[in-house]
Amino acid sequence: QSWVNGVFPKLDAKSKHAVASALLTLRTQHENEIAGAALLSLPMTASDLFHLLDDLDVAQSEDSQAAVVFITDCVREKSELGKISDISKLSSKLFDQLLVLSSTNNNEGDSGGRDYTRVSILQTLLGIHQQYKSQISDLSADDGKKRRKRSRSHSDVGSTKSLATQANMLVGIVGGNPSTINPLHSGRGRSLALSLLTCLCEESPSTVSSSLLPALMSIAGKHSSNDKEEQTRDTVDSRVLADALAAIIPAYCAHAQSADLSLFSLIESFAGKVIVPENGNGKLRTHLIDPFVNALKLLPTKEDSIDSIASLAASVLALQAFDLNNEAESTDDEDANSAKLNCHVLATSPSGIKIPISLLLLKYAEQLMAVISGASSFSADDSSTNLKAGMSEVASLALRGSNVGDDIPDSYSECNQSQQRSILYLAICLIEMVRDVTGTNAVKRLLRKSQGEDADVSLRLWQELLQAHMHALRAHAKLAAEGELRRKERKFWTAVPVAISECLENIQGLLPVPHFLASVSSTLADESTDTYMRKKTVRLLADRVAEVSLDSAEASLFLEMVPELVAQVGVAQPRLTSDDEEAVAAQKRNIIMQQGALVALESFVRSLCPASEKSKLTSKAADAFVPALESVTKLFGGTAASWSKGSDEEDAEMLGIKDAECQLLSSSSLCLASLVAVLKARCLPLLPSIVKPLIASLKSINLLVEDTEFQAESSESMLQLAILRLLEILAENLPQFLPPYLPLIFSNNALPSRALRRGDRSLKEATERVEAALASKTPIRQLTPALSKALSNTLVNSDDNDSSDWEEACSILGVINASVGTSERSELPPVIGKIFNVLVAAYSYDGGDECKSRLLSDANKVLLSLVMKLSESQLRQLYARLREWRGDIKDGDDESNQSYSRRVAFWTLSAALSKSLRSIFLPCLTSVLTDVIDELEIAVSLLCQRPKHDGSKRRRVDEDSVSDSSVDDNSQVSPLQPLLLCLESALKADAHEGGDWTRGDDNQRYNMILSHLGKLLMAHVPKDLPVSSDLSERENAATSSYQKLVEGQGTLEQGNVAGCLTALATAAGNEQLWKPLNFAVLEACSHKRSEVRRAGISCLLSIIETVGEEYMVLLPECLPVLSELLEDGDEEIAGMAKECVRQGEELLGESLEDSLR
């Protein structure tokens, strides 16, 4: 040991070399282990070891290879090898020996021994370069500086070439150059070579970069082999592969440009040959993507990583698109559109860079969409950089796959069908990838918490999505108009906006509020921004504010946006003519923006200032909307004036403007409704500017709808609904300030218009809500005068039989009825006179049967509502005034049609009162009992007078079979039916109270009524006499007027003689009074006319069923007549007679068969 440490180091170089060489010979040629141990213990430097290697020729003998192995063992045993320059020379010498052993020219001898020697050399070289990496790198840098200072010499070039040769040799060892270098077949040896190549790349990346691409191809190619057995035997360790890629790819990216290469060159070869292999049926080798992406993440800057990973993701998609469509090309199966392109790239990427990567992918998609629409070409893109692939490069992969050098078309139209499908797939899948990325929880969290630069990127992505959505819609519309869309393009342009909308939905609610609002403000302020883009921005703003709470910190930021929206509402409209196309287009754009701003304002009001919430915050927020109210009111008035004015021009453009103005008017009405609901009394200065154009617009739209025979267009119906909504809000929030405008609101064609009551149900319900609000909120003392005047103006009798004013009158009556119903009893006395005038106007209207009936019905509802809140004395006074209005009842030609009409109205209202008030009404009926008798006498005189005839036999036969009458004017007997209904209701009510009223005046009242009713059983009713009934049109035609008026078929609720007699019998209540009634009925049962007999037996049956057992005392008097009727030729009469007998037997409990013989 003393010799080793004390003597050997002092020897000269020649002596050292001789000693070491002798020991090496003894160890390798004579297998002397002691010599080997002595050699290992000698303190040799790199220079000594270099000279030992220099004496060996590994190509000549296996002994030399064994010597090299032993020398490498010595190198690895040394902790210190001396000067770095000597170490570098030793490394070069080892590389030379490795090259000799690896050359394909040296295949003689034992290949296993050569491979063992090569592995040992690789292990030694790896140890040297790992231990002295920094010193070797510094030495290389110093050499480089010296070379730059002096002219390039042959040695300089040789040094650079030597390093490149070393790298290329290592590439060959791992299988990258089998023609000149024998590759190692062991996985350990390949891993060592790869690790050594990684070290060389770190030491001198610019020199080695040209060798990296084939190395990667060879490494990954072996690693992705489909041969399981080969994979198990030869594949390098995945960790080694990842380490190699982590060193090689950043070095390649940094120095590829100097070698006239780019990242796309690497992606094109690596992804095209390995990740998406040509013969792999499109199967993606995702296990190779992870280390590749991890390597790209190690690039010097974040921007470089983003550009490179986005390029990789787009390229992998493009290659998959090419493979998928090549498979579908043979069948041309359109169902291939449903194929899903898988990309594992973004799954490995950090969440922090997924948003900017998505932005780049979206830009690729936008550029492809421009090419597909014909607005651009593949060669138009020049955005590629050293680390970012351009659209044309990505598209080339989808068009030709990894077949480098193949030409690609310049435009989409020049592509064949398979290439077109590939481009369509690539574009839509890029957008879907963005959608999927932005939909992940990790990215959503990032969006929500993003600040600074990250928030700016998120905002740019949102803006780019808006732009892409606009371009997609426009391209689709343009291509569809030009008729150039085939099925696959049509499906593409339909799917793209949907996918982009889903992306927007994913991120728009997560963007930081300050950045989002700043972007919106910038977009709205820039007039050069496309109108669709601005409208879409406003719509998204409206969606976003809906999620904001008033007590949140964000609410104040949104309130600051109100002036921006108000500015959009207040844009001045140009004066238009049909020839000025530019002005027409400008107005359309303005209307689009105004409508969007109005919708947004409405959303702002609902979210930031809810009417249901009252607090200081709400009050403060409401202050921000006062300027908005002024601006919207001004827009509303101007638009209403322009739209209501109409246009004589039928130009399509001008008609389109009118329709747009109609929609704008709807939006402004709804916006005003929201503002009024919040601002309430602060709206008063603008109330005239709101109400007047509002009613003018309502009249215009109602007239427009009424003039059309078909159903209103949706825009027209929406305008009606919007106006009604605003009216409802005004009525609910400012009722005390509306009386000056009530005459205008209830004027012709305004709120009472029939156009609001036909059409869909929602319009009717909206109208009813407005009327209910006006009726309940406005005091009746203020409402009634306006309604009274409106009704008078409406019910002006006209010669026009088609006049529909009565329908508006019915609407007004409905409002009065609701107002009376919601008013307190104390509020009514001052307005009874006005209401009376309203009723008189309705009762006096002389129109057709339908309108008369409707008016009477609605007026009676008002009367009943009023009466229910009056005392009995007030009722009698009101009834007396109505009787006075009706006038005297006269018999003869002196009566006018107006008198008949008033009598009909009077008895109709009397019937309604009688039916509702029951016994309370009897005192009122007593006051007009003489009128009742007079009416019955007139009816008897007209209907029971035998008509004159010529005495012929045929005439007599007709007289016995059917009714006839001498009535010249049917209106003479028109009061009879409502009178009968009134009398029947009163008698039923009296019967319920015991019949005292009927038997009053010592039965005189009963006898007077009976005498006339009995005669009416045998009346000659005109065939054409109008009789109200419940019968259908077909049944009504088959039923005679006599059957309806007298017998009571279909008139149980409208009034008839038989029903009145039945009620009279019920009220009479004793045998003494029943006898004359029974006699009158039996007389009718024995009449020659079958219809009279039918009416009589029907009346008798009704009395028996109603009165019951008490009436059986008169049954013996009925039996002879019943016996005859059982044999009547009319089966219906016989059937009713038989039913009378059955009822009698049931009530008496004995058979009447013997009595009937």
Image (cartoon, rainbow, N blue to C red):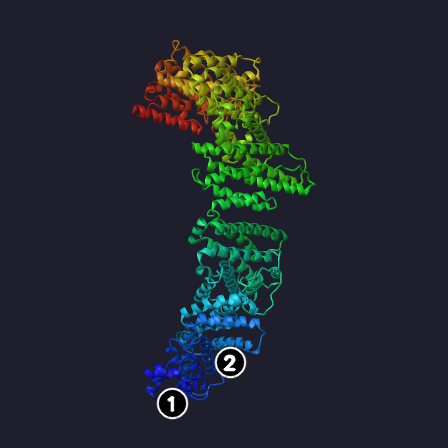
Q: Nearer the viewer, residue 577 or 296?
A: 296
Please tell me how crowded label 2 is: few (under 14), some (14-19), or many (20+) other residues with Cα within 10 Å: few
- Which numbered disc, 1 or 2, marks the residue that appears first in the sequence? 1
Which residue appears at 60% of the width and 63% of the height?
415
The residue identified by callout 1 is: 29
The residue positioned farthest toward the bottom in the image shown = 30
- Give the amino acid at mark 1: Gln
Q: Nearer the viewer, residue 750 or 807?
A: 750
Q: Quadrant of residue 1149?
A: top left
Image location of residue 1134, percent across then percent down: 41, 27
Image location of residue 617, percent across then percent down: 44, 34
The residue identified by callout 2 is: 179
Please tell me how crowded label 1 is: few (under 14), some (14-19), or many (20+) other residues with Cα within 10 Å: few
Q: Secondary structure at mark 1?
A: helix
Q: Is residue 45 above or below residue 899?
A: below
Q: Is residue 70 above or below residue 336?
A: below
Which residue appears at 57% of the width and 35% of the height?
665
